[in-house]
Image (cartoon, helix red, strand yellow):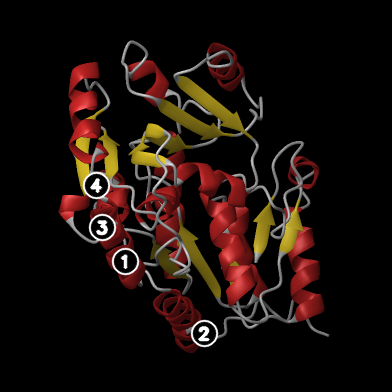
Amino acid sequence: MPVIQHEGKNFKLDDPIVLGGVEMFQRLVYENIPDVIPVYISYEDRMDRKSFDIMRLAVNTHKPDLIFTNHFNRTYTVGFQQFDVPVVWLNHSPGIRSIYNVESVKAMMEFRQNQGSLYFVSQDQLNKFNLIAKRIVGETIVSRGLINSAYATGTEEVSKEKLFDAVTVGRTDPTKNPFFLHNKLKNSSLKTCVITSNPLFTSDVQKEYAEKNANWTNPRDTVRDLSHVDAMAIMATGSVYVSTCPLESWGITALEALTRGLPLVLVSDSSGTHGSQSVADSPDDYIMVSTSVRQDDLEDAINSFKNLTFEQRCDISNRTKQKHSKERWCESINKMFADSVSQFSSNSLGGLFND
């Protein structure tokens, strides 16, 4: 399983701080599915165009039953199909109209033609990619199924202590835009908390966003670079979770909030949908608002959930845990792998990797 590392952040799957949703998903796979071997590809390796050679060495060394990729780049998807090993591609990317996704759709079509097993994380994500595919190639994408991005451990606890009216979690990045919560409620009496990371200054846009949101003060609290355990402890003291990114393909933090008894306010774009809708057990567990929502309307959405009883919060938690049990999740991953291996027919490229 290739694991892509970011500039200045050589993340490992057993690190206490998790950088994002893909990294969290890969950690869960690594921890719960036997015999998964992570292959780390650093930022420097990618800049030196060594990704393919690193993966070739890993394939020759470990002789895996399959390659499981969670990243879009032709090297990590279509490129890895040259190894004459089944390749499973779980697409986590949001289905937005962009040059990036034009190329992504073309790669998906080629990947499927080469017997690759392509999966998505939500129906909302697949629907949005199919709208792009119809425009670009005139047909829809053949997906082998949907895989949830995470599971509920069953040990998540509902806190009676409520320190914040609304909380959100997201890296300091204008796409995730966690400070949407502070900005929209800057003149509100509601107390908010943004749980985020120190910025990865990989672009001027990100740097500007970080600098603009560096100095929020009470009642706009911000906590940074916490371990996952500590971040969840603070999340649990919120009354409502606001998913500030309309481009979520699924929403691991939405699951983490629901299992702790926090209902959701989902911020949607012009599509009027959100990937985290499928995470909730019931439509009663979330409210949709638009990116242009006014302060008073966002306040109303938060206030409608803020005073749920402890028993009501426990009900949200229990229903979510049942829907997203670890057993169901592991079964879906194992089935994805088994189905992908069984449908693969060898297409060796002239014995490129003979012993």
C-alpha gap between disc 4 and disc 2: 29 Å
Give the residue at mark 4: 131
Mark nearer the N terminus (2 vs 1): 1
Q: Residue at x 56, y 34 (%)?
A: 196
Which amino acid is tagged 3? Glu
Closer to viewer: mark 3 or mark 2: 3
Which element type, helix, strand or loop, lies under badge 2?
A: helix
Q: Is residue 64 above or below residue 18?
A: below
Question: Cα distance, mark 3 to mark 2?
Answer: 45 Å
Q: CA distance from mark 4 to mark 1?
A: 35 Å
Closer-to-camera residue (106/195)? 195
Q: Could you say whether the residue bearing mark 4 is in a helix, strand or loop?
A: helix
Q: Quadrant of the C terminus?
A: bottom right
Q: Which residue is mark 1?
A: 318
Work out whether 165 lies above or below 257: above
Kind of residue sitting beneath label 1: Asn
Q: Earlier in the sequence, mark 3 or mark 2?
A: 3
Circle 2 crowding by C-alpha within 10 Å: few under 14, some 14–19, many from 20: some
Is residue 225 at least partly visible in the picture? Answer: yes
Q: Earlier in the sequence, mark 4 or mark 2?
A: 4
Residue 353 visible in the shown view: no
- SS label for mark 1: helix
In the image, which disc is placed on residue 311?
3
Cα–Cα gap, marks 2 and 1: 35 Å
Residue holding disc 2: 341
How far apart, in angstroms, are the residues tagged by discs 4 and 3? Answer: 41 Å
| Sequence order check, earlier mark of 4 and 1 | 4
In this rendering, the answer to whether 338 lies above or below 263 is: below
Indicate the quadrant containing the N terminus: top left, top right, bottom left or bottom right: bottom right
Residue 342 pos. (x, y %): 48, 89
